Structures are given as structure tokens and as C-alpha cells.
Amino acid sequence: MGLALVKEVADAARAPRLLCLHWPFGHALGEPANVPQQRAVLHDMLSMAAAAPRPGVVVQLPYRWRRETYPPVRDWTAPGPAFSTALASLTGRESINDPRSRRAPA
């Protein structure tokens, strides 16, 4: 599980699972002292680790630098709405809780 700031680098890295944010270098988790923002990104990273549909997937998070309001994370076990939306755009499902997105038993 990784976090990248440049989509092209994220694609080239070929890591098992990557989140990508278009934010300034040095601020991968967010603005200094913006705890709700940092928690939202951390929550999305944990959601990605738990719910990525396949190895090699790169999810571009929709957050915009300094133009978002981040609600508090109330349930750390449920995927965040931004992550769910971004993943759904890759997989064609409404959300990662959509029954069609469940993995077959191994």
C-alpha cells in the first residue's frame, strides 16, 4: 500500500496498491495541522489496503488541495466516501459495498 503525489509515477511504480493525490510534494497526508484532512487520507489508505479489488490498482483520490472540508471519521472499519467513489469509477460499481464487488472465496 502506497501513497503517490504524481499519477504517472504511481502507474510506473507498479506497486500492489497505490492511492494518488494531486498535492504539493512534502504534503502527502495533507496540510500541516489539518488533522481532519490527514485522518481522511489515512482512512482512505486503510480502506484501500482492505478493499482493493486486485493487485496493481491505482486509485486517484478526488481531494483538492486547500479546497475541501473533511468531516470527522466516525467509523474506521467502513470505507470513506471519497475512496468508495474513486474506486467505483475504476471498477464500474456503485460502491465497494455493492454485492457485485465482493471477491470470490479463495
Image (cartoon, rainbow, N blue to C red):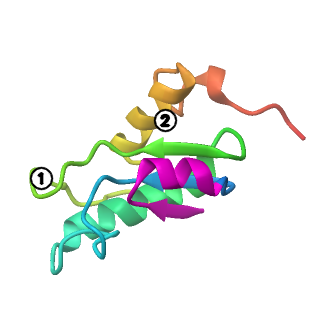
Disc 1 packing (10 Å; few <14; some 14–19; many ≥20):
few
Q: Of all residues shown, which one is farthest toward the right?
A: 106
Q: Which residue is mark 1?
A: 69
Q: Is residue 99 magenta?
A: no
Picture quadrant of residue 25: bottom left
- Say whether residue 56 is left or right of residue 85: right
Q: Which residue is mark 2?
A: 87
Image coordinates for residue 105, horizontal then vertical, percent: 86, 36
Residue toward you, 71 or 90: 90
**Amino acid tagged 2:** Leu
- Say whether residue 2 is left or right of residue 78: right
Image coordinates for residue 73, horizontal then vertical, percent: 30, 59
Residue drawn at point x = 34 percent, y = 69 percent = 28
Residue 36, compared with residue 69, is above or below; it is below
> Range of the magenta residues?
1-13
Residue 69, compared with residue 46, is above or below; it is above
